[in-house]
Image (tube, rainbow, N blue to C red):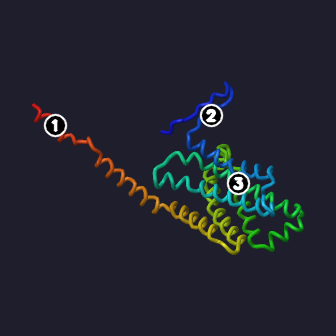
Amino acid sequence: MDRPLIHIPVGKWLPEFRFTLLQIVTHIGSWAPLAVLICRGFTNNLTVNPIQYLTYYTGDTAIRLLILSLACTPAHSIFGFKEPLKLRRPLGLYAFIYAALHFSIFLFDYNADPKLLYEAIFEKRYALVGFAAFLLLLPMALTSTKGWQRRLGKNWKRLHQFVYLAGLLVVIHYVWLVKSDIRTPLAYGAIVVALLVARIPGVRRAFASARSWVAGKVRATRPGRQTIPDRVSTRKDLR
């Protein structure tokens, strides 16, 4: 059972807030890149090409948060950690916020001109793939609440499984955008593929079995644990 670190009563008619240490670190860490970006903006420290810097910065932050969101379920199924399950939705929403900022900068760069945007999106393959990823993330962000989960039922889970396709499209977008040094986007891609493989039922069962076997071995080797016959024989010896 997860123990709350901070309990904040906010009034009779409002819900109470309970936070664990991991939740606090997650929220602070998710807002930190935006705070750094704002500070750099106020200090006029956005490099000689601010638009390019902002584009890369927000895009890179978005994919990192998206990968962390994707890692929450495997962290539970493979290692048995339950608390990361509570972080899937906030991490996914934070990833979408930075993706929306990334797309907004793209719009600003083209002066939100429909003709220029159409040419940029459909003539540049990295822009087309990135736009497709954003369109996939948009309905998932809009339906992330428990209310939408109840309304959609089983379709909610089917819809949110497209997050892996969005992750792969984001990686392709990144690879085609940087063109030369593609080591970072390829590393992101390898992580996304590994997380996708970890969701395969057979792989999940194999990890669960391995975890149970290790846990059994650990319990068996703990000192001070005796079987019932050993305890009975010990009492007889003492008599």
Under mark 3, the amino acid is Phe
The alpha-carbon separation of the residues under discs 2 and 1 comes to 50 Å
Lower position in the chain sequence, tag 2 or tag 1? 2
Q: Position of residue 36 (x, y in %)?
A: 72, 50
Which residue position holds label 1? 232
Going by the image, does 103 lie left or right of 22? right
The alpha-carbon separation of the residues under discs 1 and 3 comes to 62 Å
Lower position in the chain sequence, tag 3 or tag 2? 2
Which residue position holds label 2? 17
Q: Nearer the viewer, residue 201 or 99?
A: 99
The alpha-carbon separation of the residues under discs 3 and 2 comes to 23 Å
**Residue drawn at (31%, 52%) of the image:** 217
Q: Nearer the viewer, residue 162 or 216?
A: 216
Lower position in the chain sequence, tag 1 or tag 3? 3
Q: Secondary structure at mark 3?
A: helix
The C terminus: image quadrant: top left
Determine whether 114 is above or below 235 in the image.
below
Determine whether 98 is above or below 125 in the image.
above
Mark 2 closeness class: few <14, some 14–19, many ≥20 residues within 10 Å: few
Under mark 2, the amino acid is Phe
Going by the image, does 206 lie left or right of 225? right
Which residue position holds label 3? 96
Q: Secondary structure at mark 1?
A: helix
Under mark 1, the amino acid is Val
Determine whether 152 is above or below 207 in the image.
above
Q: Position of residue 13 (x, y in %)?
A: 69, 27
